[in-house]
Image (cartoon, rainbow, N blue to C red):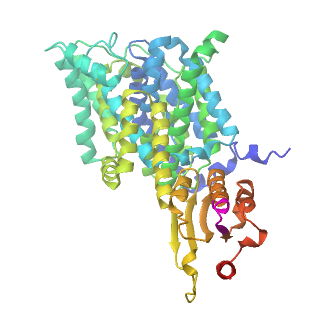
């Protein structure tokens, strides 16, 4: 058995060949991304755990461990991995139902599924997801992330709120106590103002971190009421295997499958976008799944949450000139350094949860590519329906259902378009007209002859006052078994009614279907099958002449 396929899924020294020239840029970019990732890791961890303790620490652990493992084993040179908003959207209801104690096992299960998908070479399946579905999915996630931050931004206890993020946001607005809610709301909008206004000055400055530091200092000095992150342990926790039982595995399997699908989709989309917009070489989608699977499994052993490729952090990495995975490794080491010193841990523990909500509010808004939405809504009615359907189902029902429904809707419109493109035309016979030509019907079939278009063939072929029908199949681009069967049934019906059927131009790739569908057996004689038009027309005219005698 050859080990070459497995070799392509493993790290190698060639991954760092370009670092000889780019190591300065890689290190600088890694430091920048690490600073940018700190508030996001804290915020996503806190959001995923809700009211349970340990969320910020789980976010940091995931950013460090998963970020390092995915950088080494992943298939992209500039992908930065860690906790993401989309993953938080899936985890919130699961952890609310099962408790935060299952997060380690959930990460291991989902990571193993993603790893298995990579080993089974399923990485390229993401290319089959239509653009309107991807954009609808992204917009829906952004809405959910935004709504999830509303309770924290208003200082409202999230217990007792609806599981639906949009409904919970509305409920939180109704439960907010005034003027007490003004303080957390001011903290959230203060951080948001730093991020939005600061970006107009310099996009490379970590304004989210600066905003958190300033708001946290003001919060502590003024001794304002409200929840803060609280004490965090210095360094990383020791790895340990989570408690496992067959019943728990069965209970968590659906949630783990959902997490795995989301992790694969988001990671591959992020890596593909990075490869398209940066000169860092192609990425290997199968290896990327292997790396992301190992990353989530490693994070689970340290008490972290499932990880994915992070589009925002990957974009920052690429825009800062990173060329190799050394940058993502440095990003993880920077985060590890920040959580290894009591001074920095003390500063992090004083951050108000409302301030973290402000970071995610801006992140959610920045996730939305408004130009893409405008294009899809005006490009065509079909794209608008698929985009809107995916977004609405994402917000109101479930992320994975949304992708599935969006793909089904896109496939429906694609099949309808293909069926409409399939043509059955009656054309004039070539050459000079002869007596009796009016009793010959020459039909040209083009486009796609498949199940969605087959019935139109029966409707278009008319045999009134006709003795011979010539069916030209040379321009059929796609044929399936249903199309072949319907065409065979049509030919059999015509022959039974006394009409002679001649077929012309069966393409080599359609011969097996033509035989299996009964096309070739439906003709009266093997001499009624032609490879060119002229002999078929001559045979039809000679048939009419014999009838006239």
Residue occupying the point 75% across, 58% down: 515
Quadrant of the rendered structure where residue 89 is? top left
Location of the C terminus by quadrant is: bottom right
Is residue 32 within the magenta segment? no
Find the residue positioned furthest to the left.
179
Left/right placement of residue 31 relative to residue 185 reads right
Could one spot residue 84 in this view of the protein?
A: no
| Percent of width and height locating residue 350 | 33, 18
In the rendered image, the vertical position of residue 422 relative to residue 474, given as above or below: above
Residue placed furthest toward the right: 1
Q: Position of residue 36 (x, y in %)?
A: 40, 37
Q: Position of residue 326 (x, y in %)?
A: 56, 44
Q: Is residue 57 visible?
A: yes
Magenta-span inclusion, residue 496: yes
Depicted 40 relative to depicted 386: above or below = above
Q: Nearer the viewer, residue 440 or 22?
A: 440
Q: Is residue 49 above or below residue 485?
A: above
Q: Nearer the viewer, residue 64 or 284?
A: 284
Along the horizontal axis of the image, is 175 left or right of 140?
Answer: left
**Residue 395 image offset from top left, x and y in percent:** 37, 30
Q: Residue at x 66, y 53 (%)?
A: 485
Q: Which residues are magenta?
A: 494-501
Residue at 32% from the left image edge and 16% from the top image edge: 228
Q: Nearer the viewer, residue 270 or 240?
A: 270
Q: Quadrant of residue 198?
A: top left
């Amino acid at each position: 058995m050859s080990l070459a396929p497995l070799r392509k899924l493993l790290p190698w020294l060639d991954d760092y060949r370009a670092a000889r020239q780019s190591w300065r840029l890689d290190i600088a970019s890694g430091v920048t991304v690490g600073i940018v990732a700190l508030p996001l890791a804290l915020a996503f961890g806190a959001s995923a755990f809700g009211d349970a303790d340990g969320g910020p620490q789980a976010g940091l652990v995931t950013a460090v461990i998963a970020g390092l493992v995915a950088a080494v084993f992943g298939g992209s040179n500039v992908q930065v991995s860690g906790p993401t908003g989309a993953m938080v959207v899936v985890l919130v209801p699961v952890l609310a139902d099962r408790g935060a104690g299952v997060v380690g096992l959930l990460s291991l299960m989902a990571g193993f599924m993603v790893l298995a998908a990579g080993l089974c070479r399923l990485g390229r399946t993401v290319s089959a997801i239509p653009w309107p579905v991807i954009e609808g999915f992204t917009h829906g996630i952004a809405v959910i992330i935004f709504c999830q931050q509303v309770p924290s931004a208003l200082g409202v206890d999230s217990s007792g709120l609806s599981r639906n993020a949009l409904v919970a946001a509305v409920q939180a607005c109704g439960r907010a106590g005034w003027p007490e809610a003004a303080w957390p709301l001011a903290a959230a909008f203060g951080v948001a103002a730093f991020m939005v206004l600061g970006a107009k000055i310099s996009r490379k400055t970590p304004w989210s971190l600066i905003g958190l530091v300033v708001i946290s200092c003001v919060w502590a000095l003024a001794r304002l009421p409200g929840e803060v992150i609280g004490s965090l342990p210095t360094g990383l926790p020791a790895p340990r295997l989570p408690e496992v039982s067959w019943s728990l595995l069965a209970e968590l399997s659906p949630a783990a499958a959902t997490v795995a699908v989301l992790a694969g989709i988001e990671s591959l989309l992020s890596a593909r976008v990075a490869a398209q917009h940066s000169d860092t070489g192609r990425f290997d989608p199968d290896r990327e799944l292997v790396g992301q699977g190992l990353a989530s499994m490693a994070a689970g052993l340290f008490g972290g949450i499932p990880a994915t490729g992070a589009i925002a952090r990957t974009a920052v990495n690429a825009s800062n000139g990173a060329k190799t995975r050394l940058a993502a490794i440095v990003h993880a080491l920077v985060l590890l350094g920040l959580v290894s010193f009591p001074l920095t841990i003390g500063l992090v523990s004083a951050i108000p949860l409302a301030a973290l909500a402000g970071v995610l509010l801006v992140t959610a808004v920045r996730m939305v590519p408004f130009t893409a939405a405008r294009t899809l809504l005006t490009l065509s009615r079909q794209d608008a329906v698929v985009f809107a359907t995916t977004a609405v189902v994402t917000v109101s029902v479930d992320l994975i259902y949304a992708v599935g429904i969006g793909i089904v809707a896109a496939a429906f419109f694609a099949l309808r378009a293909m069926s409409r493109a399939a043509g059955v035309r009656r054309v004039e016979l070539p050459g000079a007209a002869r007596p009796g030509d009016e009793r010959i019907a020459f039909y040209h079939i083009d486009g796609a002859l498949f199940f969605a278009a087959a019935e139109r063939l029966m409707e278009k072929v008319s045999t009134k006052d006709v003795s011979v029908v010539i069916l030209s199949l040379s321009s059929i681009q796609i044929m399936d078994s249903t199309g072949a069967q319907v065409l065979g049934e049509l030919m059999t019906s015509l022959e039974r009614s006394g009409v002679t059927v001649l077929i012309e131009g069966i393409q080599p790739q359609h011969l097996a279907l033509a035989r299996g569908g009964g096309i070739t057996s439906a003709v009266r004689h093997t001499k009624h099958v032609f490879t060119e038009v002229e002999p078929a027309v001559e045979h039809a005219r000679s048939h009419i002449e014999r009838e006239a005698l």
